[in-house]
C-alpha cells in the first residue's frame, strides 16, 4: 500500500482513539443539560447554575475554530522547520520541528477532542434532535481533525 494512504489511515485511527479516550468529557455536559431540562425546577438556584454552565459550553464552541487555526499555523511552521532541518543536519531546526510536532500532538489535538466531545455531550442532553446533531457534529469534527493530523504527519515526514 502507498505510504500516503497509510499515513491517512494511521491519522484516522489515532484520532478515533483520541476522541474515544475523551468520551468521559461528554458525561458532565450531558448530565448538566439533562438536569436543567428535566430534573431541576425552573427558576431555582440549581437551574441558574446549570444554565450558566450550558452558556459556558456554548461559549467554548468558538475555541474549536481558534484551536484549528493555531494547528494550521503550527503546521505551516513545521513545514518550514522540517525543510530547514533537512538542509542543515544537526541544527536547532530539528529541535524546533520536534517541539512543534509535540505541541500539535500533545496539546492542540487533545484540547480539540475534549471540546468537541464536551459539545457533543451538551447537544445530546437536548433529546433525540440534539443527539442527531451531536453525532453529525462529532463526526464532522473527527474528519476535520483527522485531516489536519494527516497534514501534520505529512509536514513532519522527511523528504524523499
Image (cartoon, helix red, strand yellow):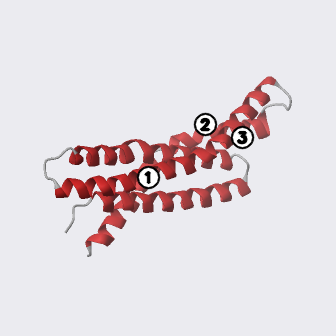
Secondary structure of residue under mark 1: helix
Task: From the viewer's perspective, tell me whether residue 34 is left or right of residue 24.
Answer: right
Please name the residue shown 67% across and 49% down the image: 123
Residue at (83% x, 26% y) in the render: 44
In the depicted structure, whether residue 159 falls above or below residue 134: below
Horizontal side, residue 80 vs residue 56: left or right: left
Q: Residues within 10 Å of mark 3 (few under 14, many from 20)?
A: many
Q: Nearer the viewer, residue 86 or 8?
A: 86
User: Can you identify the residue that label 3 sits on?
Assistant: 34
The tag earlier along the polypeptide, 2 or 3, is 2
Q: Give the Cα distance between marks 1 and 2.
A: 32 Å
The answer to which image quadrant residue 131 occupies is bottom right
| Mark 3 or 1, nearer chain start | 3
Q: Which residue is mark 2?
A: 28
Marks counted in the figure total: 3
Check the image and report above or below for 109 versus 143: above
Residue 117 lies, in percent from the top left, at 55, 47
**Which residue is denoted by mark 1 in the rendering?**
73
Q: Residue 128 at x, y = what percent?
A: 72, 56
| Mark 3 element type | helix
Amino acid at each position: 500500500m502507498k505510504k500516503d494512504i497509510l499515513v491517512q489511515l494511521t491519522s484516522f485511527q489515532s484520532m478515533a482513539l483520541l476522541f474515544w479516550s475523551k468520551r468521559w468529557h461528554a458525561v458532565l455536559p450531558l448530565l448538566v443539560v439533562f438536569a436543567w431540562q428535566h430534573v431541576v425546577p425552573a427558576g431555582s438556584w440549581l437551574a441558574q447554575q446549570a444554565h450558566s454552565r450550558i452558556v459556558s459550553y456554548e461559549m467554548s464552541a468558538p475555541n474549536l475554530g481558534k484551536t484549528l487555526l493555531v494547528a494550521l499555523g503550527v503546521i505551516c511552521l513545521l513545514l518550514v522547520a522540517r525543510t530547514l532541518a533537512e538542509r542543515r543536519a544537526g541544527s536547532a531546526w530539528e529541535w524546533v520541528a520536534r517541539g512543534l510536532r509535540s505541541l500539535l500532538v500533545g496539546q492542540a489535538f487533545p484540547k480539540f477532542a475534549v471540546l468537541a466531545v464536551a459539545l457533543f455531550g451538551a447537544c445530546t442532553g437536548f433529546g433525540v434532535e440534539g443527539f442527531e446533531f451531536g453525532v453529525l457534529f462529532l463526526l464532522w469534527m473527527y474528519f476535520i481533525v483527522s485531516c489536519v493530523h494527516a497534514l501534520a504527519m505529512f509536514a513532519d515526514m522527511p523528504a524523499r
